[in-house]
Image (cartoon, rainbow, N blue to C red):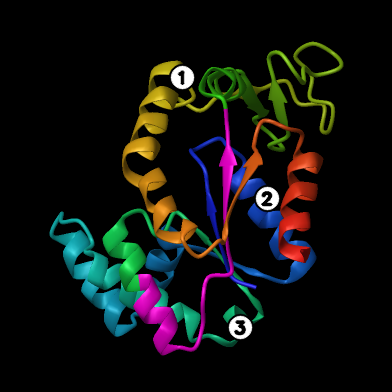
Amino acid sequence: MNLILLGPPGAGKGTQASRLVKERGMVQLSTGDMLRAAVAAGTPVGLAAKAVMDAGGLVSDEIVNGILSERLDQPDARAGFILDGYPRTDVQADALDAMLGDKGLQIDHVIELVVDEDALVDRITGRFTCGSCGEGYHDRYKLPKVADTCDVCGGHAFKRRADDNASTVRQRMAEYRAKTAPIIPHYQSRGIVARVDGMASMDAVAGSIDAILDA
């Protein structure tokens, strides 16, 4: 079972992908992680990527496709994979189709986590974590039981991501609508696109995704 998970930053893709990895043995393929791993391993494509990055350039689609191709050839990917953050354009989607076809693979499902922009801004801008153990909290939905004290470790230092602000979140939403969402029609004609309410609880989202995969 191979799938593409779509949705703007903060929609919950990472949470759901991690669950699928744990519960179904799937492999999460993030282009950023694969790029760093290929560079660290010194593969031919990784070395090409490193040369581009060291020169201050942007890694081309050709290099990204090469790194993804290398990763898909590893045995664990045969158990099923989740693509997160790729493809982002029609050109990448076409290249992915060709690559998978050569390997006898295909995309089985494209699942988009649909969110309400204002609600997503509220969700992201209100979140903060314990500086000691990383436990997550929210100004509106999950405050520590005792003010300024982490429920898990008892720590008193909390932190927020600098980019968890309304303007940044709305900019990311606009980028998603402009660059990534347009690939959905590429897959709609195959009848493999499904949309899930990303604003529901994590368990509800997980249940919806499982229903799609098990249908």
> Where residue 198 sits: x, y (%)?
64, 36
Which residue matches tag 1? 165
Q: CA distance from mark 1 to mark 2?
A: 23 Å
Mark closer to the chain start, 1 or 2: 2
Residue tagged by mark 3?
78
Question: In what quadrant of the picture does the C terminus appear?
Answer: bottom right
**Marker count (numbered):** 3
Image coordinates for residue 104, horizontal then vertical, percent: 49, 88
Instruction: Indicate which disc residue 16 carries.
Output: 2
Picture quadrant where residue 25 is located: bottom right
Q: CA distance from mark 2 to mark 3?
A: 20 Å
Q: Residues within 10 Å of mark 3 (few under 14, many from 20)?
A: some
Point out the stretch of residues depicted in magenta: 96-115
Nearest to the observer: residue 90 or residue 49: 90
| Mark closest to the chain's N terminus, 3 or 1 | 3
| Res 96 → quadrant | bottom left
